[in-house]
Amino acid sequence: MKAKAQKPRNLAVVHGKRVAVLGAGSWGTTFAKILADGGSDVVVWARRPELAREIQEAKRNSDYLPGVNLPVSLRATARLDLALAGAEQVFVSVPSQSLRENLVAVQPHLGENAIVVSLMKGVERASGLRMSEVIAQVLPIAPDDIAVISGPNLALEIAKQQPTAAVVSSTSLETAQAVAMLATNGYFRSFVNTDVIGTEFGGVLKNLIAVAIGIVDGVGYGENTKASIITRGLVEMTDFAVAYGAQPETLSGLAGLGDLIATCQSPLSRNNTAGRLLGQGYSFGDVVKQMQQTTEGFASVGPILELARAKGVEMPIVEQVRQVLDGTLDPKDIAPHLTTDSDEPQGERTLDDGQAHGGAALWGSLKRAFHQLRNGGRGSLGD
Ligand SMILES: NC(=O)C1=CN([C@@H]2O[C@H](COP(=O)(O)OP(=O)(O)OC[C@H]3O[C@@H](n4cnc5c(N)ncnc54)[C@H](O)[C@@H]3O)[C@@H](O)[C@H]2O)C=CC1
Ligand SMILES: O=C(CO)COP(=O)(O)O
């Protein structure tokens, strides 16, 4: 029997707050639908006028969301000033590498008390900064007015109103709650936390593990290999994010494990699909040409490995993804060296030996501090 889509709960009469969504690709358009179905007065900004016209007039985005009818209340424009006029909350969903240039154009039109929300899952290649950090750098707004949203959110499934959850995170719980109030309807539920670092890095890092899973799929390996990579991948994600100040629990939540499961399992994932093509033997250049949509993992792998090195975090799976992208590792060799170069048996949890030394977290910090000392105190990209 075909699953029945959930009905949106129409809250238009309850609030009708004016919001803007910047970026009319698959996620921007889907998120605009989430907000409109939750009762907000939404204007989407599309870079291409013909796309803005299709959304505005036909209530369709046929390239990105084929077969999906958008809410009749949803409006679209190719003019940033019109999209931003009066917007209390601004949701940004452009490719991560274009965020900075887009924010420069946004700045003159941004309302004084507007909250800016990142829907993106990448880091800036040149700086290694998370999207909320780029927003804080470019826009004259307080960190408490910035939020991020992440979770197992494959756009097309949500556009078809299949029930889904996400996390809204901000250093201000009040801001996270204000955003979550609008980003909730009958088929989409937003939870809140204040761990921006963990929430953002969860979204970035699961993309890299999804590329690895795609590679394994393309090669033709089975479920044991994939389960091993997903599980060890989560350890890498958690070690990395915690080294940068995240709460480990965030990585076992929707923005970590939740998104990892969705992205690694679904052919709808662009990162997973791109990995599969690599595993089937296509070169990186061929895969980039074939991918019609944003594949964030490709741009993130370099900066993430650099950030990992700076904190002494080992990421053997992500490292192997880089080698496959570079053409220095045969995709079929990705699994055998799942752990480090050492032949010695390793504890399953990175911090296991630390617990014997009287505190896993402390031991992890000491290991990282030692590593940084050995590397001349380098702590971040570009140091
Ligand atoms: N598609 C999904 O299921 C989800 C995507 N995301 C994240 O959302 C972000 C956006 O991804 P998608 O919407 O999926 O990508 P997409 O490839 O579907 O759409 C990207 C949109 O940005 C436009 N664009 C390209 N270059 C631009 C530029 N320089 N300035 C402004 N616009 C530009 C494109 O024309 C297109 O409309 C990514 O960071 C992605 O990781 C997050 C959750 C779910
Ligand atoms: O982030 C996503 C699902 O949560 C979408 O993943 P892809 O960018 O790989 O399509």
Image (cartoon, rainbow, N blue to C red):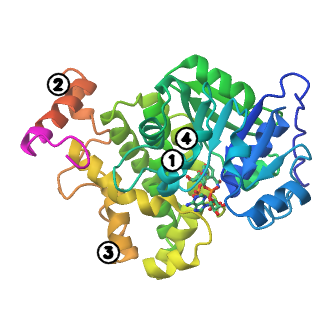
Q: Do residues under tags 1 and 3 come within 8 Å of each other at their CB atoms?
A: no
- Asked if the stretch drawn in magenta spans residue 84, the answer is no
Classify residue 347 as left or right of residue 139: left
The residue nearer to you, when weighing 109 against 56, is 109
Which residue bears the numbered disc 2?
357
Find residue 289 and report its horizontal and vertical position in percent: 54, 79
Q: Tell me if label 4 and label 3 are in contact, CB under 8 Å.
A: no
Q: Quadrant of ligand 2?
A: bottom right
Tell me the distance, in whole angstroms, between the alpha carbons under discs 4 and 3: 44 Å
- Residue 107 bears which disc, if any? 4
Residue interval drawn in magenta = 371-383
Magenta residue check for 379: yes
Question: In the image, residue 87 lies at what x, y percent?
Answer: 71, 33
The answer to which of marks 3 and 2 sits earlier in the sequence is 3
Using a 10 Å C-alpha cutoff, classify the residue at mark 3 as few (fewer than 14 neighbours), some (14 to 19) or many (20 or more): some
Q: Nearer the viewer, residue 367 or 304?
A: 304
Apparent side of residue 307 relative to residue 11 in the rendered image (left or right): left
Which disc, if any, is residue 104? 1
Q: Give the CA separation, mark 3 to mark 2.
A: 37 Å
Residue that label 3 marks = 329
242 or 128, which lies in front? 128
**Residue flagged by tag 1: what amino acid is it?**
Val
Crowding around mark 1 (Cα neighbors within 10 Å: few <14, some 14 to 19, many 20+) is: few
Residue depicted at x 82% and y 51%: 160
Residue type indicated by callout 3: Leu
Residue 189 in the image, given as x and y percentages of width and height: 72, 32
Above or below: residue 10 compared with residue 343 = above
Which residue does the image show at 75% across and 52% down from the upper left? 157
Q: Earlier in the sequence, mark 1 or mark 3?
A: 1
Q: Which mark is residue 243?
A: none
Residue drawn at x 53%, y 69% is: 274
